[in-house]
Protein backbone atom coordinates (compact mmCIF):
# COMPACT_ATOMS: atom_id res chain seq x y z
CA UNK A 1 0.00 0.00 0.00
CA UNK A 2 1.41 3.43 -0.98
CA UNK A 3 0.87 5.69 2.02
CA UNK A 4 -1.33 8.77 1.69
CA UNK A 5 0.83 11.86 2.11
CA UNK A 6 -0.69 14.27 4.61
CA UNK A 7 -0.39 17.97 5.22
CA UNK A 8 -1.86 18.90 8.61
CA UNK A 9 -2.64 22.61 8.90
CA UNK A 10 -2.90 23.49 12.59
CA UNK A 11 -1.22 20.30 13.81
CA UNK A 12 -0.74 21.50 17.41
CA UNK A 13 -4.44 22.16 18.03
CA UNK A 14 -7.18 19.90 19.31
CA UNK A 15 -8.14 18.55 15.86
CA UNK A 16 -4.49 18.48 14.74
CA UNK A 17 -3.37 16.31 17.66
CA UNK A 18 -6.41 14.03 17.36
CA UNK A 19 -5.55 13.59 13.67
CA UNK A 20 -1.98 12.60 14.55
CA UNK A 21 -3.35 10.15 17.11
CA UNK A 22 -5.43 8.40 14.43
CA UNK A 23 -2.60 8.52 11.89
CA UNK A 24 -0.15 6.94 14.37
CA UNK A 25 -2.38 3.85 14.48
CA UNK A 26 -1.87 3.30 10.73
CA UNK A 27 1.78 3.82 9.83
CA UNK A 28 1.37 1.86 6.57
CA UNK A 29 -1.52 4.01 5.39
CA UNK A 30 -0.37 7.54 6.18
CA UNK A 31 2.84 9.53 5.92
CA UNK A 32 3.03 12.95 7.55
CA UNK A 33 4.54 15.23 4.91
CA UNK A 34 3.92 18.71 6.35
CA UNK A 35 2.88 20.17 9.71
CA UNK A 36 1.98 23.77 10.54
CA UNK A 37 1.33 25.77 13.70
CA UNK A 38 0.93 29.35 14.81
CA UNK A 39 2.15 29.41 18.42
CA UNK A 40 3.32 26.56 20.66
CA UNK A 41 6.59 26.00 18.81
CA UNK A 42 7.68 23.48 21.46
CA UNK A 43 4.69 21.28 20.66
CA UNK A 44 5.38 21.55 16.93
CA UNK A 45 9.07 20.74 17.50
CA UNK A 46 8.11 17.61 19.46
CA UNK A 47 5.82 16.52 16.60
CA UNK A 48 8.61 17.09 14.07
CA UNK A 49 11.10 15.12 16.16
CA UNK A 50 8.62 12.25 16.38
CA UNK A 51 7.42 12.24 12.76
CA UNK A 52 10.22 13.89 10.74
CA UNK A 53 7.89 15.56 8.21
CA UNK A 54 9.49 16.99 5.07
CA UNK A 55 8.14 20.50 5.80
CA UNK A 56 6.98 22.57 8.76
CA UNK A 57 5.44 26.04 8.67
CA UNK A 58 5.25 28.62 11.48
CA UNK A 59 3.88 32.15 11.64
CA UNK A 60 6.95 34.34 12.09
CA UNK A 61 10.75 34.49 11.94
CA UNK A 62 11.20 34.18 15.70
CA UNK A 63 9.13 30.96 15.67
CA UNK A 64 11.08 29.74 12.64
CA UNK A 65 14.44 30.28 14.38
CA UNK A 66 13.24 28.56 17.53
CA UNK A 67 11.97 25.57 15.58
CA UNK A 68 15.15 25.29 13.48
CA UNK A 69 17.29 25.33 16.63
CA UNK A 70 15.18 22.62 18.29
CA UNK A 71 15.32 20.44 15.17
CA UNK A 72 19.07 20.91 14.76
CA UNK A 73 19.58 19.74 18.32
CA UNK A 74 17.75 16.52 17.46
CA UNK A 75 19.29 16.05 14.01
CA UNK A 76 15.89 16.34 12.29
CA UNK A 77 16.03 17.42 8.64
CA UNK A 78 12.56 19.02 8.37
CA UNK A 79 12.59 22.18 6.22
CA UNK A 80 11.15 25.10 8.20
CA UNK A 81 9.16 27.81 6.40
CA UNK A 82 7.60 31.00 7.70
CA UNK A 83 4.43 32.90 6.90
CA UNK A 84 0.99 32.74 5.32
CA UNK A 85 2.24 32.09 1.78
CA UNK A 86 4.18 29.02 2.93
CA UNK A 87 0.93 27.64 4.38
CA UNK A 88 -0.61 27.79 0.90
CA UNK A 89 2.48 26.23 -0.65
CA UNK A 90 2.51 23.17 1.59
CA UNK A 91 -1.28 22.78 1.25
CA UNK A 92 -0.96 22.73 -2.55
CA UNK A 93 2.37 20.84 -2.68
CA UNK A 94 2.40 18.35 -5.58
CA UNK A 95 3.50 15.53 -3.28
CA UNK A 96 0.58 16.01 -0.86
CA UNK A 97 -2.49 13.77 -1.28
CA UNK A 98 -4.68 14.92 1.63
CA UNK A 99 -4.86 18.15 3.59
CA UNK A 100 -6.35 18.28 7.07
CA UNK A 101 -7.59 21.88 7.45
CA UNK A 102 -7.51 22.34 11.23
CA UNK A 103 -6.51 25.98 11.55
CA UNK A 104 -9.00 27.97 13.61
CA UNK A 105 -10.66 31.01 12.05
CA UNK A 106 -10.62 32.87 8.75
CA UNK A 107 -6.81 32.53 8.67
CA UNK A 108 -7.45 29.06 7.27
CA UNK A 109 -9.27 30.26 4.16
CA UNK A 110 -6.27 30.98 1.91
CA UNK A 111 -4.56 27.58 2.45
CA UNK A 112 -7.94 25.83 2.06
CA UNK A 113 -8.43 27.56 -1.29
CA UNK A 114 -4.91 26.60 -2.33
CA UNK A 115 -5.57 22.94 -1.48
CA UNK A 116 -8.93 23.03 -3.26
CA UNK A 117 -7.45 24.55 -6.42
CA UNK A 118 -4.68 21.93 -6.37
CA UNK A 119 -7.32 19.16 -6.34
CA UNK A 120 -6.44 17.66 -2.97
CA UNK A 121 -8.55 15.49 -0.73
CA UNK A 122 -9.51 18.27 1.63
CA UNK A 123 -10.55 17.26 5.14
CA UNK A 124 -12.32 20.32 6.45
CA UNK A 125 -12.48 21.01 10.18
CA UNK A 126 -11.93 24.76 9.70
CA UNK A 127 -15.60 25.72 9.35
CA UNK A 128 -14.81 29.45 9.43
CA UNK A 129 -13.10 29.11 6.03
CA UNK A 130 -16.39 28.02 4.49
CA UNK A 131 -18.40 30.61 6.42
CA UNK A 132 -16.16 33.37 5.05
CA UNK A 133 -15.43 31.90 1.62
CA UNK A 134 -18.70 30.10 0.75
CA UNK A 135 -19.23 30.40 -2.98
CA UNK A 136 -15.54 31.07 -3.76
CA UNK A 137 -14.47 28.02 -1.76
CA UNK A 138 -16.96 25.69 -3.45
CA UNK A 139 -16.09 26.92 -6.92
CA UNK A 140 -12.39 26.32 -6.14
CA UNK A 141 -13.27 22.77 -5.10
CA UNK A 142 -15.12 22.22 -8.39
CA UNK A 143 -12.47 23.88 -10.56
CA UNK A 144 -9.61 21.97 -8.91
CA UNK A 145 -11.46 18.65 -8.85
CA UNK A 146 -10.84 18.45 -5.09
CA UNK A 147 -12.69 16.03 -2.81
CA UNK A 148 -14.19 17.86 0.14
CA UNK A 149 -14.69 15.69 3.23
CA UNK A 150 -16.35 17.23 6.30
CA UNK A 151 -14.67 16.70 9.68
CA UNK A 152 -17.07 18.66 11.88
CA UNK A 153 -18.93 15.85 13.66
CA UNK A 154 -22.41 17.02 12.61
CA UNK A 155 -21.43 17.38 8.95
CA UNK A 156 -19.58 14.09 8.99
CA UNK A 157 -22.81 12.56 10.32
CA UNK A 158 -24.87 14.07 7.49
CA UNK A 159 -22.23 13.01 4.97
CA UNK A 160 -22.32 9.42 6.26
CA UNK A 161 -26.14 9.34 5.98
CA UNK A 162 -26.15 10.51 2.35
CA UNK A 163 -25.72 8.42 -0.82
CA UNK A 164 -22.17 7.92 -2.05
CA UNK A 165 -23.12 9.56 -5.35
CA UNK A 166 -23.27 13.31 -4.64
CA UNK A 167 -25.54 13.87 -7.63
CA UNK A 168 -28.29 12.13 -5.65
CA UNK A 169 -28.04 14.38 -2.58
CA UNK A 170 -30.55 16.99 -3.76
CA UNK A 171 -33.24 14.41 -4.58
CA UNK A 172 -32.63 12.61 -1.24
CA UNK A 173 -32.77 15.46 1.26
CA UNK A 174 -35.97 17.08 2.49
CA UNK A 175 -34.09 18.79 5.31
CA UNK A 176 -31.30 18.12 7.76
CA UNK A 177 -31.29 18.40 11.54
CA UNK A 178 -28.03 19.45 13.17
CA UNK A 179 -27.76 18.44 16.81
CA UNK A 180 -26.24 20.77 19.40
CA UNK A 181 -25.26 19.91 22.96
CA UNK A 182 -26.38 23.29 24.31
CA UNK A 183 -22.93 23.73 25.85
CA UNK A 184 -22.12 24.50 29.47
CA UNK A 185 -24.88 27.12 29.95
CA UNK A 186 -27.88 25.20 28.64
CA UNK A 187 -29.65 25.30 31.98
CA UNK A 188 -28.05 28.31 33.57
CA UNK A 189 -30.13 31.38 34.39
CA UNK A 190 -29.51 33.76 31.44
CA UNK A 191 -29.42 36.67 33.91
CA UNK A 192 -26.29 35.15 35.50
CA UNK A 193 -24.30 34.90 32.25
CA UNK A 194 -22.80 38.39 32.56
CA UNK A 195 -20.29 37.18 35.10
CA UNK A 196 -19.05 33.90 33.61
CA UNK A 197 -15.30 33.49 33.16
CA UNK A 198 -13.47 32.20 30.07
CA UNK A 199 -12.65 28.97 31.91
CA UNK A 200 -16.32 28.40 32.74
CA UNK A 201 -17.31 29.07 29.13
CA UNK A 202 -14.64 26.63 27.89
CA UNK A 203 -15.73 23.81 30.22
CA UNK A 204 -17.80 21.93 27.64
CA UNK A 205 -19.82 19.04 29.09
CA UNK A 206 -19.13 16.52 26.27
CA UNK A 207 -16.23 17.61 24.07
CA UNK A 208 -12.65 18.76 24.73
CA UNK A 209 -11.83 21.40 22.08
CA UNK A 210 -9.81 24.53 21.38
CA UNK A 211 -10.81 27.63 23.35
CA UNK A 212 -12.38 29.58 20.51
CA UNK A 213 -14.78 26.81 19.44
CA UNK A 214 -15.52 26.10 23.11
CA UNK A 215 -16.73 29.69 23.64
CA UNK A 216 -18.68 29.41 20.37
CA UNK A 217 -20.37 26.30 21.77
CA UNK A 218 -21.35 28.18 24.93
CA UNK A 219 -22.99 31.00 22.91
CA UNK A 220 -24.20 28.53 20.25
CA UNK A 221 -22.45 30.65 17.62
CA UNK A 222 -20.71 27.38 16.80
CA UNK A 223 -24.04 25.98 15.64
CA UNK A 224 -24.75 29.16 13.69
CA UNK A 225 -21.42 28.70 11.86
CA UNK A 226 -22.34 25.05 11.28
CA UNK A 227 -25.67 26.02 9.72
CA UNK A 228 -23.73 28.12 7.20
CA UNK A 229 -21.18 25.33 6.77
CA UNK A 230 -24.01 22.87 5.99
CA UNK A 231 -25.52 25.26 3.46
CA UNK A 232 -22.34 25.07 1.39
CA UNK A 233 -21.28 21.47 1.98
CA UNK A 234 -24.66 20.03 1.03
CA UNK A 235 -25.98 22.82 -1.22
CA UNK A 236 -29.10 23.48 0.89
CA UNK A 237 -31.52 26.38 1.18
CA UNK A 238 -31.56 28.05 4.62
CA UNK A 239 -34.99 26.60 5.41
CA UNK A 240 -33.69 23.07 4.81
CA UNK A 241 -31.41 23.36 7.84
CA UNK A 242 -32.81 22.88 11.35
CA UNK A 243 -31.17 22.68 14.75
CA UNK A 244 -32.19 20.70 17.81
CA UNK A 245 -30.58 20.56 21.23
CA UNK A 246 -29.48 17.06 22.18
CA UNK A 247 -27.52 17.33 25.44
CA UNK A 248 -25.99 13.84 25.32
CA UNK A 249 -24.11 14.41 22.01
CA UNK A 250 -24.70 10.82 20.91
CA UNK A 251 -26.79 11.45 17.78
CA UNK A 252 -24.40 13.60 15.75
CA UNK A 253 -27.02 14.80 13.22
CA UNK A 254 -29.73 13.51 10.91
CA UNK A 255 -31.00 13.61 7.37
CA UNK A 256 -34.77 13.72 6.90
CA UNK A 257 -35.32 12.24 3.44
CA UNK A 258 -38.02 13.20 0.94
CA UNK A 259 -40.00 10.10 1.96
CA UNK A 260 -39.66 11.20 5.65
CA UNK A 261 -37.36 8.36 6.54
CA UNK A 262 -34.81 9.75 9.00
CA UNK A 263 -31.19 8.64 8.89
CA UNK A 264 -28.98 9.47 11.86
CA UNK A 265 -25.36 8.75 12.75
CA UNK A 266 -24.49 7.87 16.35
CA UNK A 267 -21.31 7.41 18.30
CA UNK A 268 -19.37 8.42 21.38
CA UNK A 269 -18.43 12.12 21.31
CA UNK A 270 -14.84 11.66 20.15
CA UNK A 271 -13.50 13.68 17.20
CA UNK A 272 -11.24 10.80 16.21
CA UNK A 273 -14.34 9.16 14.69
CA UNK A 274 -15.14 11.84 12.07
CA UNK A 275 -11.39 12.33 11.52
CA UNK A 276 -11.01 8.61 10.73
CA UNK A 277 -14.06 8.74 8.47
CA UNK A 278 -12.48 11.59 6.50
CA UNK A 279 -9.00 10.08 6.39
CA UNK A 280 -10.06 6.64 5.18
CA UNK A 281 -13.21 7.40 3.17
CA UNK A 282 -14.75 5.28 1.72
CA UNK A 283 -12.98 2.67 3.84
CA UNK A 284 -13.28 2.36 7.63
CA UNK A 285 -10.33 2.24 10.00
CA UNK A 286 -9.79 1.83 13.74
CA UNK A 287 -9.38 5.18 15.50
CA UNK A 288 -9.13 4.52 19.23
CA UNK A 289 -12.64 5.69 20.15
CA UNK A 290 -14.80 3.66 22.53
CA UNK A 291 -17.84 1.89 21.08
CA UNK A 292 -21.25 3.05 22.26
CA UNK A 293 -22.68 0.82 24.97
CA UNK A 294 -26.43 1.01 24.41
CA UNK A 295 -27.16 -0.81 27.67
CA UNK A 296 -25.61 2.08 29.62
CA UNK A 297 -26.70 4.96 27.46
CA UNK A 298 -29.89 5.96 29.26
CA UNK A 299 -32.20 8.51 27.69
CA UNK A 300 -31.45 10.43 24.52
CA UNK A 301 -33.36 13.71 24.70
CA UNK A 302 -34.13 16.50 22.25
CA UNK A 303 -35.42 20.04 22.76
CA UNK A 304 -35.91 23.21 20.74
CA UNK A 305 -33.21 25.90 21.15
CA UNK A 306 -34.51 28.87 23.14
CA UNK A 307 -34.04 32.16 21.22
CA UNK A 308 -33.78 34.12 24.50
CA UNK A 309 -30.97 31.96 25.80
CA UNK A 310 -29.17 31.41 22.48
CA UNK A 311 -29.81 34.47 20.29
CA UNK A 312 -26.49 33.90 18.46
CA UNK A 313 -27.82 30.77 16.76
CA UNK A 314 -30.54 32.67 14.97
CA UNK A 315 -28.07 35.08 13.34
CA UNK A 316 -27.17 32.23 10.96
CA UNK A 317 -30.37 32.22 8.92
CA UNK A 318 -30.46 36.03 8.83
CA UNK A 319 -26.91 36.10 7.48
CA UNK A 320 -27.65 33.38 4.92
CA UNK A 321 -30.62 35.34 3.64
CA UNK A 322 -28.70 38.62 3.66
CA UNK A 323 -26.41 39.91 0.90
CA UNK A 324 -23.36 37.84 0.02
CA UNK A 325 -20.63 38.48 2.57
CA UNK A 326 -23.05 38.71 5.52
CA UNK A 327 -21.74 35.45 6.95
CA UNK A 328 -18.15 36.70 6.57
CA UNK A 329 -19.08 39.82 8.58
CA UNK A 330 -20.67 37.68 11.29
CA UNK A 331 -17.63 35.41 11.47
CA UNK A 332 -15.10 38.24 11.62
CA UNK A 333 -17.01 40.01 14.37
CA UNK A 334 -17.32 36.79 16.32
CA UNK A 335 -13.60 36.00 16.07
CA UNK A 336 -12.82 39.43 17.49
CA UNK A 337 -15.44 39.44 20.23
CA UNK A 338 -14.51 35.92 21.36
CA UNK A 339 -10.82 36.90 21.42
CA UNK A 340 -11.71 39.92 23.58
CA UNK A 341 -13.75 37.74 25.92
CA UNK A 342 -10.93 35.18 26.19
CA UNK A 343 -8.51 38.04 26.89
CA UNK A 344 -10.74 39.11 29.76
CA UNK A 345 -11.61 42.56 28.40
CA UNK A 346 -15.36 42.07 27.71
CA UNK A 347 -18.16 40.10 29.33
CA UNK A 348 -19.61 36.87 27.93
CA UNK A 349 -22.87 38.61 27.06
CA UNK A 350 -21.00 41.36 25.19
CA UNK A 351 -20.04 38.78 22.54
CA UNK A 352 -23.56 38.63 21.16
CA UNK A 353 -24.18 42.32 21.68
CA UNK A 354 -21.13 43.15 19.54
CA UNK A 355 -21.87 40.57 16.85
CA UNK A 356 -25.50 41.62 16.45
CA UNK A 357 -24.48 45.26 16.18
CA UNK A 358 -21.70 44.60 13.65
CA UNK A 359 -23.92 42.54 11.34
CA UNK A 360 -26.52 45.27 11.51
CA UNK A 361 -24.11 48.08 10.63
CA UNK A 362 -21.48 46.62 8.28
CA UNK A 363 -22.84 46.35 4.73
CA UNK A 364 -20.86 43.75 2.74
CA UNK A 365 -21.09 45.50 -0.69
CA UNK A 366 -19.10 42.79 -2.47
CA UNK A 367 -18.66 42.65 -6.25
CA UNK A 368 -20.62 39.98 -8.13
CA UNK A 369 -17.89 37.36 -7.98
CA UNK A 370 -15.75 38.28 -4.98
CA UNK A 371 -12.11 37.26 -4.86
CA UNK A 372 -10.15 36.22 -1.78
CA UNK A 373 -8.86 39.79 -1.48
CA UNK A 374 -12.42 41.17 -1.56
CA UNK A 375 -13.43 38.79 1.22
CA UNK A 376 -10.35 39.55 3.32
CA UNK A 377 -10.98 43.30 2.95
CA UNK A 378 -14.56 42.80 4.16
CA UNK A 379 -13.30 40.59 7.00
CA UNK A 380 -10.87 43.36 8.01
CA UNK A 381 -13.61 45.99 7.90
CA UNK A 382 -15.89 43.95 10.16
CA UNK A 383 -13.01 43.29 12.59
CA UNK A 384 -12.35 47.03 12.96
CA UNK A 385 -16.00 47.58 13.85
CA UNK A 386 -16.03 44.67 16.29
CA UNK A 387 -12.82 45.82 18.00
CA UNK A 388 -14.21 49.33 18.34
CA UNK A 389 -17.33 48.00 20.02
CA UNK A 390 -15.24 45.71 22.25
CA UNK A 391 -13.21 48.74 23.41
CA UNK A 392 -16.44 50.56 24.23
CA UNK A 393 -17.69 47.55 26.23
CA UNK A 394 -14.38 47.39 28.10
CA UNK A 395 -14.70 50.95 29.38
P1 LIG B 1 -7.16 24.91 18.36
O1 LIG B 1 -7.16 26.30 18.83
O2 LIG B 1 -6.99 23.81 19.34
O3 LIG B 1 -6.02 24.73 17.24
C1 LIG B 1 -5.86 25.63 16.19
C2 LIG B 1 -4.62 25.32 15.37
O4 LIG B 1 -4.51 26.33 14.35
C3 LIG B 1 -3.32 25.36 16.17
O5 LIG B 1 -2.42 24.44 15.61
C4 LIG B 1 -2.81 26.79 15.92
O6 LIG B 1 -1.40 26.89 16.04
C5 LIG B 1 -3.27 27.04 14.49
N1 LIG B 1 -3.53 28.45 14.22
C6 LIG B 1 -4.23 29.31 15.02
N2 LIG B 1 -4.28 30.53 14.46
C7 LIG B 1 -3.61 30.45 13.29
C8 LIG B 1 -3.30 31.39 12.26
N3 LIG B 1 -3.69 32.67 12.34
N4 LIG B 1 -2.58 30.97 11.20
C9 LIG B 1 -2.18 29.69 11.12
N5 LIG B 1 -2.43 28.76 12.06
C10 LIG B 1 -3.14 29.13 13.13
O7 LIG B 1 -8.52 24.72 17.52
P2 LIG B 1 -9.34 23.37 17.29
O8 LIG B 1 -10.32 23.19 18.39
O9 LIG B 1 -8.44 22.25 16.91
O10 LIG B 1 -10.22 23.80 16.02
C11 LIG B 1 -9.67 23.88 14.72
C12 LIG B 1 -10.80 24.04 13.71
O11 LIG B 1 -11.60 22.87 13.74
C13 LIG B 1 -11.74 25.21 14.04
O12 LIG B 1 -12.18 25.80 12.86
C14 LIG B 1 -12.92 24.52 14.75
O13 LIG B 1 -14.12 25.21 14.57
C15 LIG B 1 -12.95 23.18 14.01
N6 LIG B 1 -13.54 22.11 14.81
C16 LIG B 1 -12.97 21.72 15.98
C17 LIG B 1 -13.53 20.70 16.73
C18 LIG B 1 -12.89 20.23 18.01
O14 LIG B 1 -13.34 19.25 18.58
N7 LIG B 1 -11.84 20.85 18.49
C19 LIG B 1 -14.71 20.08 16.29
C20 LIG B 1 -15.28 20.50 15.09
C21 LIG B 1 -14.68 21.51 14.35
MG1 LIG C 1 -19.49 20.50 15.30
Image: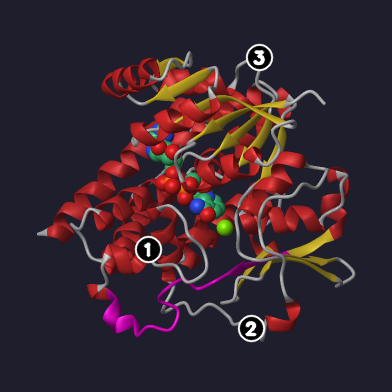
The CA distance from mark 2 to mark 3 is 47 Å
> 30 left or right of 376?
right
> 252 left or right of 36?
right
Q: Residue at x 55, y 61 (%)?
A: 317
Locate residue 244, reporting x and y percent.
61, 74
For disc 2, the marked residue is 301
- Per the rendered image, the range of residues in magenta is 176-193
For disc 1, the marked residue is 202
Image quadrant of ligand 2? bottom right
| SS type, badge 3 | loop
Instruction: Indicate yes or no whether the magenta region holds residue 192.
Output: yes
The CA distance from mark 3 to mark 1 is 38 Å
Instruction: Indicate yes or no whether the magenta region holds residue 309.
Output: no
Label placed on residue 94: 3
Q: Is residue 140 above or below residue 126?
A: above
Classify mark 1: residues with Cα within 10 Å, few (<14), some (14-19) or many (20+): many
Quarter of the image holding residue 267?
Answer: bottom right
| SS type, badge 2 | loop
Q: Residue at x 44, y 73 (%)?
A: 310
Mark sitting earlier along the chain (2/3): 3
Mark sitting earlier along the chain (1/2): 1
Classify mark 2: residues with Cα within 10 Å, few (<14), some (14-19) or many (20+): few
Amino acid sequence: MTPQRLCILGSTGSIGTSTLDVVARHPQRYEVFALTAHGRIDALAAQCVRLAPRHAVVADDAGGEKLRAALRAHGVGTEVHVGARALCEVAAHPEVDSVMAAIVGAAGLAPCLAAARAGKRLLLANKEALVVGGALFMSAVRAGGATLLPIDSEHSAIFQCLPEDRRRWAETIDHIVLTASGGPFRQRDPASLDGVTPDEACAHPNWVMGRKISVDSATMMNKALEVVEARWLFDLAPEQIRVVIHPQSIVHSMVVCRDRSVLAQLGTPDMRVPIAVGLAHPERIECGADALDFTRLGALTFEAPDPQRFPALFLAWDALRGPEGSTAVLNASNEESVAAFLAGTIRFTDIHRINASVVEHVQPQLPLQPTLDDLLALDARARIEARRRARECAR
